[in-house]
Amino acid sequence: MVRKIRIILAFGLYATNLRCSISNIQPTSHGKTWWTQREDLSRKRSWNVESPERLLYKQPSATRGGSDVMAVTPWLAPIIWEETFNPELVDAIYKPMNLTIATTVFAVGKYIRFLGEFLETAEKHFMVDFKVHYHIFTDQPQEVPAVNLAAGRKIFVHQVPKLDRWQDISASRMQMIQTIIEEQVHREADYIYCQDVDAKFHFRWGAETLDRLVGQIHPWYYDLSRDQFTYERRPESTAYIPSGVGDFYYIGAMFGGTVEDVYRLVKKCHENIEADKAKGIEAAWQEESHLNWYLLHNKPSKVLSPEYMWDDQRGKTEVMRVIRLSQILKNYGEVRENV
Amino acid sequence: MIIYCTPLSFRQRKVLFRDRNCDLDSPKGLLYKQPGITLGRCDVVAVTPWSAPIVWEETFDPVLVDAIYKPKNLTIATTVFAIGKYIRFLRDFLETAEKHFMVDFKVHYHIFTDQLQDVPAVDLAAGRKIFVHQVPKLKRWQDISASRMQMIQTIIEEQLYREADYIYCQDVDAKFHFRWGAETLDRLVGQIHPWFYDLGRDQFTYERRPESTAYIPPGEGDFYYIGAMFGGRVEEVYKLVKSCHENLEADKANGIEAAWQEESHLNWYLLYNKPSKILSPEYLWDDLRGKANVMKVVRLSHILKNYAEVRENT
């Protein structure tokens, strides 16, 4: 493995005084914005699911092996669990596509301490053998650890300010992801996965997660009824979800999909957060509330089971055959900016 | 409304397809049962190893599915071939389709027949049309069957690319009994054959001769797909039928006819270009098979008939 550390200090981003606003996007020489070009590109992209000849794997069945978990949503998006997919087949389909997958993590304030393990375990388990671009947002670029990266994988470091409230740090991510897509990721990546840094990978977290728009079921809510979900319940908020409505409770710590679909998600959530702010409202769980509103009304095309984002605090449950990624135990009082 | 079309001419043309929005927008205020992730049917498998859904009763919510797809103002084309004695099945097909097939959607029925005058007059719901295309009656049923790939390719080039978002290519000798709806919409859709869903892959009647372009060796194969139903977005089905047509011609030049004609080529194509959605045998059953425990509903079924009596040669 070649020791390859590419750390690029891209530019400064300011969450509240945004220098790179949308109105400054320059049209291309053909008179189109990058967004229109991207839509053209996505239309030309082949969505074929080509499978190589002579690949051998166990025969699928439509009737044998029905399981204790639901593998599809009521709108027929797959829910990804161990044994619902064949990893060799999935890799054989996706690897030849020469994809680049961007991932964003925010390591601001004391959360920088989690970055080393996140990156090292990601190198072992996250999209192995794919081209991955880690986009690290931090107020301490000098603290970004040196990690051995496999070939084709890069780290980009973006300096951001440390805000006073953890709620603000969390909510500002939507705007920052929107900006990084506009500035860079739209040119360089096909898919983007936006993750929390205070987590470790333990097992394959791979191409079975690729899809147009992907939501992650919250590990504490997968077995609760919708009226127990901590949606925003005040009608004055743009994130309002009334009782009696709701599919899953999605965790803000992971969402992803194609760059264009995630762009629409983060842009909308950012707009809604700003609209709420103008009215003096902060949604119950900040951007997570807005994410849940968005994914309720713009259904994900794929949903990840709690295997893909567990919480070490929850211990083991019967339905979990593997844990692929989990939020690590920590003392919130110690790491958050304000408690 | 029936629209009679001029005979097909087989011209190649570059085609551009209709743009469409692929979002799954769900209207505010829509009420439906909460999905669970640990409860559901355990007697069937609802997803393939490449994560394409397999559509069974109770794996989807019809109210939610309709609420997502109806606002998209889609047009769904369906092709049926009613040639020779098969014209007798057309009325039942159309009348039951009006009751169960993509109800409340815009549907264009494209009927290929050698007997224009025998196309029955059927009441169609608003937004639904029939187009009739005259085609010759070939001497062998195998040739009639195999020629469908080329004809579907042509009708897409000539007309459908402009007018339809999705296309479903079906057999006429079948009747609808239950909802056959928007839950079937997807990029590329295959239909599991009702006689093969519970067999090992080495019992599938794939083409087994390496000389054929449809060759699938033992040890490979996902499902046995029936040639009587395949569908998806117009551009995806176009690629499928074009590829199958080319392969049929290549085989013909080599003096080979695959074991089950275009069905063998369809199976080859769907093995190496995986469908994004698969329909359970509920979506095309065979009345000859009777009942099976796993079938909670039968939505469409091939009707009992005497093959010797209806086929061109037997």
Image (tube, coloured by chain):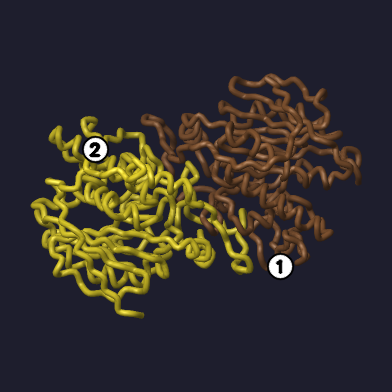
Chain colours: A yellow, B brown
Q: Residue at x 43, y 43 (%)?
A: B35
**Along the viewing direction, whichever of B274 and B58 lies nearer the viewer:** B274
Q: Relative to residue A19, is residue A117 depicted above or below?
A: below
Q: Is residue B294 visible?
A: no
Mark 1 belongs to which subunit?
B
Quarter-of-image position of residue B290: top right
Q: Position of residue B28 (x, y in %)?
A: 36, 31
Q: Which mark is residue B218?
A: 1
Quadrant of image for the N terminus of chain A:
bottom left
Q: Secondary structure at mark 1?
A: loop
Q: Relative to residue A184, is residue A39 depicted above or below?
A: above
Quarter-of-image position of residue B198: bottom right
Tell me the residue that label 2 is attached to: A272
Mark 2 belongs to which subunit?
A
| Label 1 packing within 10 angstroms: few (<14), some (14-19), many (20+) | few
Question: What amino acid is found at the position of numbered circle 2 in the picture?
Answer: Asn
Q: Relative to residue B107, is residue A239 depicted above or below?
A: below
**Along the viewing direction, whichever of B296 and A164 lies nearer the viewer:** A164
Q: Check if mark 2's residue and mark 1's residue have beta carbons within 8 Å.
A: no
Q: Position of residue A260 (x, y in %)?
A: 37, 47
Q: Position of residue A206 (x, y in %)?
A: 42, 63
Q: Secondary structure at mark 2?
A: helix
Q: Is residue B134 visible?
A: yes
Q: CA distance from mark 2 to mark 1?
A: 55 Å
Relative to A39, B11 lies left or right: right
Q: Position of residue A188 (x, y in %)?
A: 35, 58
| Label 2 packing within 10 angstroms: few (<14), some (14-19), many (20+) | some
**Along the viewing direction, whichever of A171 and A1 lies nearer the viewer:** A1
